[in-house]
Amino acid sequence: QTPVATAGRSQMGVAGADLPTIAKTATGRYTVTYPASWTDGLGESENIAFLWAGGTVQHLTTFGTIQCTVAANVISVAIFDAAGAATDLGGAISVLVSAS
């Protein structure tokens, strides 16, 4: 199953074009990539560079833990099950990734 950003909120906006691109790189591993910059409402170019990120599994009966790292405009996400093994959570479980 291809991961998709289904919702988002940022200074850039909330439209589909403002959502990041998500790529699966291995089992339980993903990258969330935003544009390197965007133009604000005043016409000024603003760089995107995250300082931190974290995540949670959005399901009541599926356990998973999420670890994130950031590098400029890219968030790397790793998802693990209760045994510590990388997992895709069955492919139908949503995760929430927050970054600033």
Image (cartoon, helix red, strand yellow):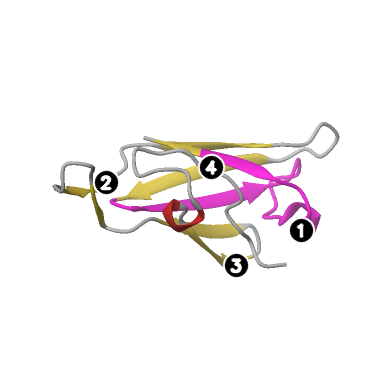
Say which residue label 1 marks: 91
Q: In whole angstroms, how far apart are the C-alphas of marks 1 and 3?
A: 13 Å
Mark 1 vs mark 4: which is more N-terminal? 4
Where residue 28 appears, x then y in whole percent? 64, 57
Seen in the image, is 61 located left or right of residue 25?
A: right
- Precedes in sequence: disc 2 or disc 3: 3
Report helix, strand or loop for mark 1: helix
Question: Disc 4 designates what residue?
Answer: 67
Question: Does the residue at mark 2 contact the one at mark 1 (Cβ under 8 Å)?
Answer: no
Q: Nearer the viewer, residue 12 or 3?
A: 12
Q: Nearer the viewer, mark 1 or mark 3?
A: 1
Mark 4 is on which residue type? Gln
Label 2: element kind: loop
Task: Give the number of the mark in front: 2 or 3.
Answer: 2
Amino acid type, mark 2: Ala
> Which of the numbered marks, if any, corresponds to residue 49?
2
- Distance of mark 1 from mark 4, alpha carbons? 18 Å
**In front of the other: label 1 or label 4?**
1
Does label 2 or label 1 sit earlier along the sequence? Answer: 2
Label 4 crowding class (10 Å Cα cut-off): few <14, some 14-19, many 20+? some
Earlier along the polypeptide chain: callout 1 or callout 3? 3
- Residue 95: say if magenta: yes
Give the mark, 4 or 3, whose residue is nearer the N terminus: 3
Q: Could you tell me how far apart the alpha carbons at marks 2 and 3 are, in whole angstroms?
A: 24 Å
Where residue 79 appears, as percent x and y from the top left, is 63, 49
- Asked if labels 3 and 2 touch by Cβ distance under 8 angstroms, the answer is no
- Amino acid marked by disc 3: Ala
Residue bounds of the magenta highlight = 72-97
